[in-house]
């Protein structure tokens, strides 16, 4: 089965903020994931956390696979 | 032979005023019962390999006696659960489907009875018109994005989409409309697709049913340097007040005093 990644909020903060210690590392991972065509999942929970400080429309949403929050995720 | 190595699956009914038996049964009923017994033994995890199970067909009315079941641990655990009528949520979903199917058939036909008995002639469970095996309603409405290959699309009376997921799983048909597929469904056969759907998901088995297509979504990931730089420009400002993102997230999630 093909590998895939689930983004977490810390990764996204490092990716979008050039002042973060891990910004370059996050950028390299991001480019590698796209280059390798690996599925990048973006959950509704992470979207909710990230959007407290920045609109998710700033993110490259077309590159992500949305994961809606459903009842089975809550149990 | 060990007492827990053998099970006897029996079916009783009447055909043309005669009790069914190995010498008096329709080909269809024999095939259905054989499949049910095989499905029950296998369960979802192929706990038992039917190709290695020896079976004898006996009178009374018609019975399959399966041997070589000693190592089938979930099978025996499920049989223990089936002593209770409210057990269908507790057992393997494939086995529950067989029991539900037997119950449905028996409720329509008072002559139809099923029993499963061990080698000591102890009835492990039986199904007849009075049985009341029940299952809690464990289906919830969900919304999902499904990625896979469309292997069939359209239909004369029902317009639907058939998709094989990236993990190889094939889902039930995804309902759509003729109008939508005429407008957006062309040139999608045998190609990767991202489908936005609603469905009902079983909380216990993760099975999906009643899938309905909301839309075909566009999904062609690619890196764009210009877009990336704008995102970083905005992000660096937006997060400038958050010195320690880990601590900020811990606070947000309520895990710090």
Image (spheres, coloured by chain):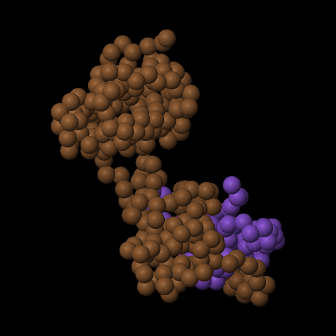
For the C terminus of chain B, the quadrant is bottom right
Give the vertical position of A60 relative to A43 (above or below). below
- Chain A rendering hue: purple
x 46%, y 61%: residue = B172
Residue B71: horizontal and vertical position, in percent?
Answer: 54, 23
On the image, which quarter does residue B140 sit in? bottom left
Give the vertical position of B174 relative to B229 (above or below). above
x 41%, y 75%: residue = B156
Q: Is residue A66 visible?
A: no
x 68%, y 62%: residue = A5
Residue B89 shown left or right of residue A11 in the figure? left
Give the vertical position of B4 relative to B233 (above or below). above
Q: Is residue A18 visible?
A: yes
Residue B183: horizontal and vertical position, in percent?
Answer: 50, 87
Residue B121: horizontal and vertical position, in percent?
Answer: 33, 15
- Chain B rendering hue: brown
Give the vertical position of B115 relative to A65 (above or below). above
Residue B154: horizontal and vertical position, in percent?
Answer: 48, 75
Q: Nearer the viewer, residue B12 or B4?
A: B12
Residue A40 shown left or right of residue B180 in the figure? right
């Amino acid at each position: 089965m093909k590998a895939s990644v689930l983004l977490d909020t810390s990764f996204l903060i490092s990716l979008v903020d050039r002042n973060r210690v891990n910004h370059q590392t996050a950028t390299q991972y991001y480019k590698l994931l796209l280059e390798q065509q690996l599925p990048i999942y973006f959950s509704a929970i992470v979207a909710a956390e990230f959007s407290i400080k920045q609109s998710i429309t700033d993110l490259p949403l077309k590159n992500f696979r949305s994961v809606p929050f459903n009842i089975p995720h809550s149990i | 032979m060990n007492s827990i190595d053998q099970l006897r699956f029996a079916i009783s009914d009447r055909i043309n005023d005669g009790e069914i038996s190995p010498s008096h049964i329709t080909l269809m009923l024999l095939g259905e019962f054989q499949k049910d017994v095989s499905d029950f033994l296998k369960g979802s995890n192929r706990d038992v390999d039917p190709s290695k199970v020896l079976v004898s067909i006996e009178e009374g009315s018609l019975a399959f006696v399966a041997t070589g079941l000693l190592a089938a641990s979930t099978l025996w655990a499920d049989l223990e659960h089936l002593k209770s009528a409210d057990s269908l949520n507790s057992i393997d979903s494939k086995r529950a489907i067989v029991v539900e199917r037997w119950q449905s058939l028996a409720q329509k036909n008072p002559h139809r009875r099923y029993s499963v008995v061990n080698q000591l002639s102890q009835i492990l469970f039986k199904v007849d018109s009075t049985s009341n095996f029940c299952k809690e309603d464990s289906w919830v409405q969900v919304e999902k994005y499904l990625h896979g290959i469309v292997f069939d699309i359209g239909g004369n009376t029902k317009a639907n989409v058939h998709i094989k997921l990236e993990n190889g799983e094939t889902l039930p048909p995804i309902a759509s409309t003729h109008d939508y597929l005429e407008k957006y469904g062309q040139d999608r056969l045998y190609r990767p697709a991202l489908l936005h759907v609603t469905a009902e998901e079983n909380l216990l088995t993760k099975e999906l049913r009643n899938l309905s297509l909301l839309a075909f979504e566009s999904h062609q990931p690619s890196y764009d340097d210009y877009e990336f730089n704008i995102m970083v420009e905005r992000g660096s400002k937006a997060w400038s007040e958050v010195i320690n993102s880990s601590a900020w997230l811990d606070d947000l999630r309520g895990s710090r005093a």
